[in-house]
Image (cartoon, helix red, strand yellow):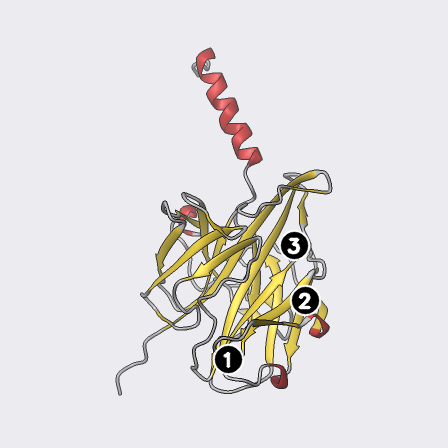
Amino acid sequence: MKPIRLEVLPLLLGAVLGAAAAPALAHFLVVYTPQTAIQRATDLPFHLIFTHAFHGGPSMAMEKPQRFYYAKRSAPGEEIEQVDLSQYLEPIDWAGENGPVSAWKATVPRNVVRSLGDYQVVVEPTPYLEETEQLYIQQFAKVMVNVGGVPGNWSETLGLPAEIHALNKTYANWTGGIFRGVVLGNGVPMPYTQVEVEYLNHALDTDNNRFAAQGAITAPHPSLEAMVILTDANGQFSFALPRAGWWGFAALSVGPAKEYNGKPLSQDAILWVQATDLPESP
């Protein structure tokens, strides 16, 4: 084996230090509800799991979210109303690779989502310490639910520290369609920013609080498990949704806060998008 040339050592050291300083990839705050386009008001179940979406684990212990709410505009011209949903949160033990970890579920009653239109459901979690990197992660996650097909505030931003502004309805996408969004950090578009894309590859067994053991697909290469795309000069990105189901988009470390409890903090923006297969012709 040839010795490493001295002039190469600074480059190698820089690469190692850069990798160590980068936010942890593949972490996703999953905000799961079975269907986001519903015909009429009904009880809405949610499961909140901090995990690795494509692999269905390992899952990490999750403290109670700092905030859990929906944002909705009741009528054109009115202010967007935020309705606190934290009273419906219940702690659960989610099956992990090394034993159960804390996660959360909620059933939002139909009288709380009784009107037609869009509901932007938001989770603002307590920062999580990634021990291996000595880095805190806080993922501001959104999923949208539509009742009755009446459009609402799906295209509006909520002023989160880290947020993905949807340019398509997240609940109305045929498989193969293009989803577009803009990454915002403290309300400002973030150019040339990494957006990680993962497929929720394992079905959720919500009765037993675990992921299905077998994934829907097997990626032929690791780069297809957690794909990374860059926003353009205006902070915008696009992605073709190749398979029905849930797709998670994560813009890493775009929030303004960079430290928590004396350690580095990555404030990430998470948006969940549901794709639906075209029905067969009659």
Q: Position of residue 269 (x, y in %)?
A: 53, 54
Type of residue at label 3?
Met
Looking at the picture, does residue 131 appear above or below residue 147? above
Q: What secondary structure is found at the residue carrying circle 1?
A: loop
Type of residue at label 1?
Ala
Q: Position of residue 51 (x, y in %)?
A: 59, 56
Q: Mark 1 = which residue?
A: 75
Tell us which disc is closer to us: 3 or 2: 2
Query: Which of the 4 image quarters holds residue 101?
Result: bottom right
- Left-right relation of 31 to 181: right
Type of residue at label 2?
Trp
Q: Mark 3 = which residue?
A: 60
Looking at the picture, does residue 2 appear above or below residue 174? above
- How packed mark 2 is, by other alpha carbons closer than 10 Å (few <14, some 14-19, many 20 or more), is many
The residue positioned farthest toward the top in the image shown = 6
The residue depicted at 54 percent of the width and 84 percent of the height is: 115
- How packed mark 3 is, by other alpha carbons closer than 10 Å (few <14, some 14-19, many 20 or more), is many
Q: What secondary structure is found at the residue carrying circle 3?
A: loop
Q: CA distance from mark 1 to mark 3?
A: 39 Å
Q: Mark 2 = which residue?
A: 104
Q: Quadrant of the C terminus?
A: bottom left
Q: Quadrant of the N terminus?
A: top left
Q: What secondary structure is found at the residue carrying circle 2?
A: strand
